[in-house]
Image (cartoon, helix red, strand yellow):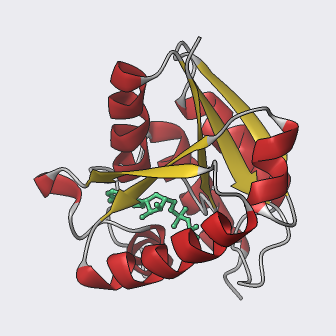
Amino acid sequence: MKTVIYPGSFDPITNGHLDIIQRALKLFDTVIIAVLENNTKKTLFSTEERMALVKACTKGLKVEVETFSGLLVEFAKKKNCNTIIRGLRAVSDFDFEFQMNVINNSINKELETIFLMTSKEYFYLSSSVVKELASKSGDVSEYVPEEVNTALAKKYSERLP
Ligand code: ADP
């Protein structure tokens, strides 16, 4: 049984994340989606909301959705899993991921990170871009699953003065 951990903020989950999950499932039996809890970045959606959206959007897929806080290395140890999967888009992703990989590896040499290149249609897609667009009432329906589109519309309508 091959398992991989896919960690991230998922604020919110996008079609780019789903593409990585579906492709990871071709290589692994199960994907543990690890939603980062103690984010230093301020998130639009609470941990519970992010987790609920990930669950709703991955129904029927062989995934487990969990939250984690603290070190990813510790979470991986707790899950008895030595493989991490991450998506790579621009060169800026590479720089950050390279640093993270060096740090994670210095703590646990057994931990391997596998990188999947983004599919070309998701190259420019990020949760930040989706939030930016949705906050200005832009149409994000082609970038996110239906549930996320609805949640974004609700979130930003609540925020209106
Ligand atoms: P983080 O805050 O840890 O970067 P994200 O939720 O933004 O978490 O992303 C989680 C992972 O998914 C990262 O590896 C990121 O590079 C990847 N990812 C996000 N969007 C895309 C996309 N459009 N194509 C490929 N990978 C993506």
Side of 29 relative to 81 (left or right): left
Residue drawn 71% across and 58% down?
A: 108
Number of marks present in the image shown: 0
Q: Is residue 152 above or below residue 111?
A: below
Relative to 93, 63 lies left or right: right
| Left or right: where 120 falls relative to 111 | left
Residue 16, position as x, y percentages in the image: 35, 51
Could you tell me if residue 157 is visible in this image?
Answer: no
- Residue at 74% x, 67% y is 107
Which quadrant of the picture is home to ligand 1?
bottom left
What is the x, y in percent for residue 46? 81, 62
Q: Looking at the image, which residue is at 72% across and 70% down?
A: 158
Most foreground residue, 44 or 69: 69
| Rendered position, 138 above or below 14 | below
Quadrant location of the N terminus in the rendered image:
top right
- Quadrant housing residue 105: bottom right
Q: Quadrant of residue 69?
A: bottom right
